[in-house]
Image: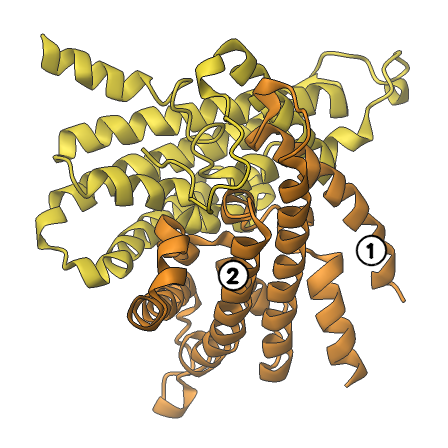
Amino acid sequence: MPARASLWNTLTDPLVHQNPVTLQILGICSALAVTTSVATALTMSAALTAVLVMSAGLISLIRNHIPGSIRLIVQIVIVASLVIVIDQILQAYLFEISQKLSVFVSLITTNCLVLGRTESFSRHNPPGRSMVDALGNGLGYSVVLVVIGSVRELFGAGSLLGVQVFQTVDQGGWYTPLNLMLLAPSAFFLLGGLVWAIRTLLPAQAETIDLLSPDKPEDLS
Amino acid sequence: MNDLVSLFLSAAFVENMPLTLFLGLCTFIALSRKTGSAAGLGIAVVAVMGVTVPLNHLIYTALLAPGAWAWAGLPETDLSYLKLIAFIGVIAATVQLLEMVLDRFFPAIYASFGVFLPLLTVQCAILAGSLFMVERSYTLAESTVFGLGAGTGFAVSVIMLGAIRARLAYAHIPEGLRGLGITFILAGMMSLGFSAFAQMVAS
């Protein structure tokens, strides 16, 4: 069935081939800031995916009634209300992690990933398809977060999900934690390396050199 | 006066939005291919932040802060949980206004911004500026300076990155690392450099 196949593609394409973080340059801010440990990365991924799916569904439902000139404000208000709900839920049930995430849960509102998907996809597609697309993009984002979070936590603190994997020197073991991993620059280096790895495996994603061509924004598909 | 100068410097360099706080990275990376568009983005961010942070400060103190409705006989009312939606509304309106003005009077600049001008609404740095302003309870003058400083810091770093990338266009970079990959590594190095400014905050 072609319809089903294309739905499946809508779901799986963003995982690697159209990954929102490594290819579309969307949602990078939070991807780097919350990845000092796997637990925060997972919470952030879940929160973002929930907001993304719900806002895609809602905006897609009312897409024919939003006037073009004020669409941004309408979309952002919908997203912001959903974020407030998620923020309250996190504070009620996962208080410690929500303290660690601090301002970044509120900043899901301004995560380019959410508005980027609603602008480029939900505005033109029916709710079901939009939600599948949103789920796929949310999962693609989560994959990147969890990979970077695992590397940073493993080498920065010698643990994974809070469970000690390498015995650090402080605890009488052999592993000296690499503090740089927990600081800002390493997140940039790791994501750069990840992009390099993906594009070496999938050469189709590599960017061609355009020397003197005029400025053009990245492809948002 | 001295306080304001040091606040400006610390907002611009010590707490550089993209490089130390990871805020506003999407546009930081995506629009820094050429120095020209990077400068345009930088100016737009300075303008939007310089307007929205003080504006949000006024709205927050007049309407949302705990006790703001005391004059109406409602001293208990605390609407501060609405700040997110109020701030983003102000920012979205400002950006939409900017978009209309550019579209009408400067179509060339408008075309070169493309999809990223609407995305300025979702510039994390701009919203974060307003949220930090509340968290640190700045006065009106301080929040104006803070908004301009944070915007300037963003503009400086995005123009620097744009200049480096323009030069790198002529370098032989491994195929998979071209474009996005090398940009992240550059940003990492700039972030290492900017971490040296952290020493300034004590003095």
Q: CA distance from mark 2 to mark 1?
A: 25 Å
Residue A18, given in percent of the width and then of the height, sits at 38, 24
Q: Is residue A55 left or right of residue A17?
A: left
* Few, some or many residues within 10 Å of mark 1 (<14, 14–19, 20+): some
Q: Nearer the viewer, residue B66 or A35?
A: A35
The answer to whether tags 2 and 1 share a subunit is yes
Determine the residue positioned at 56% across, 13% down.
A200
For the point 72% across and 12% down, which residue is it? A165
Residue A48, image x, y percentages: 40, 37
Q: Amino acid at mark 2?
A: Gly
Q: Kindly indicate whether the residue at mark 1 contacts the one at mark 2 (C-beta within 8 angstroms).
A: no
Q: Which chain is yellow?
A: A
Q: Is residue A214 visible?
A: yes
**Mark 2 crowdedness (10 Å alpha carbons): few <14, some 14-19, many ≥20:** some
Q: Quadrant of the C terminus of chain A?
A: top left
Residue A28: x and y in percent read: 52, 38
- Can you tell which of label 2 and label 1 is closer to the viewer? 2
Res B176 → quadrant: top right
